[in-house]
Image (spheres, rainbow, N blue to C red):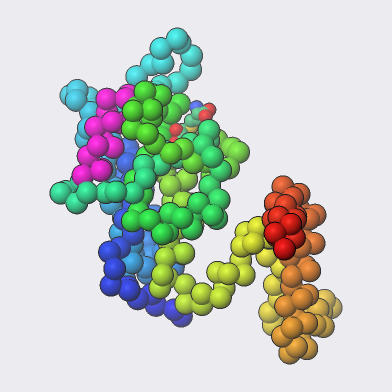
Amino acid sequence: MHIPESNGSAPWLARVLTIFPEMFPGPLGHSLAGKALEAGIWQLETLDIRSFASDKHRSVDDTPFGGGAGMVMRPDVISAAVEAARGHGGQEHTGPVIYLSPRGAPLTQERARALADSPGAILLCGRYEGVDQRALDRLEVEELSVGDYVLSGGELAAMILMDAVVRLLPGVMGNVETLSEESFEQSLLEYPLYTRPAVWEGMEVPEVLLSGHHERIRQWRQAQAEEITRARRPDLWARVEATRAGRRKQR
Ligand code: SAM
């Protein structure tokens, strides 16, 4: 098993703002992300949004102006929490402030890769109906969504984002080649995978994979990845075609 090793540079720093700090590290304390956390490749800090409330009930939310269901997270409390996260414990955080939100831009592999190249991120986890718009505008937060569905809070979304980023940090994955062949690299989904036994319940592994012929295997995988992407994700496939057309024009 691969044991991650810190490369000596400053750890990727995730500062998570949440009313449920006890949820962390949760699943991120296990497997690859957990080992990388232990190895100091990344660092996880939580700030309890409630500790920035100013009343004796530690309220972080209030009823929406204009009426309607649910509660809204107060701008003064959220703003104080984010400002504290930017300079927490004397250690300034220069990474982006990201509000996990179903209204956000979709979290993509490309964004995860860019985040892995940054010093870290401040992750704001919403609860209730979400955060007062004025705080989001004033703090210039980036909104990212983990999918077209509504979660009950931003904590799981923040964990998804961190998991996607941490596995891209130098030293986390043993085999860097694995990363370059994964889904979404070159906008393609991954080709089908097979392992032993070579025949299982009467089903055989494609013959080419047993041939030992590297170039034929590469071509087969490329064709499969293209076929799967074309069939399952026309949106990604359109991007592949556009990139290829652009390259042809440049020649
Ligand atoms: N009223 C909001 C709406 O309709 O867009 C949904 C609020 S949701 C119940 C509470 C919090 O969960 C949000 O503020 C956000 O932080 C988080 N959340 C829910 N769905 C999410 C998603 N798809 N991606 C990222 N964060 C999400």
Taken as a whole, is the magenta stretch helix, strand or loop? helix
Question: Nearest the camera: 244 or 8?
Answer: 244
Question: Magenta stretch: residue 95 in it?
Answer: no
Residue beneath the point at 41% across and 24% down: 133
Picture coordinates of residue 86, whole percent (x, y) = 25, 43
Question: Nearest the camera: 183 or 197?
Answer: 183
- The reply, left or right, for residue 80 in relation to residue 154 is left
Q: Is residue 150 above or below residue 242?
A: above
Residue beneath the point at 62% across and 59% down: 184
- The reply, left or right, for residue 204 in relation to residue 33 is right
Q: Quadrant of residue 52?
A: top left
Region rendered in magenta: 74-87
Picture coordinates of residue 165, whole percent (x, y) = 45, 58
Q: Quadrant of residue 76?
A: top left
- Is residue 43 visible to us here? yes
Question: Magenta stretch: residue 79 in it?
Answer: yes
Q: Is residue 165 above or below residue 177?
A: above
- The reply, left or right, for residue 126 in relation to residue 164 is left
Residue beneath the point at 44% across and 79% down: 2
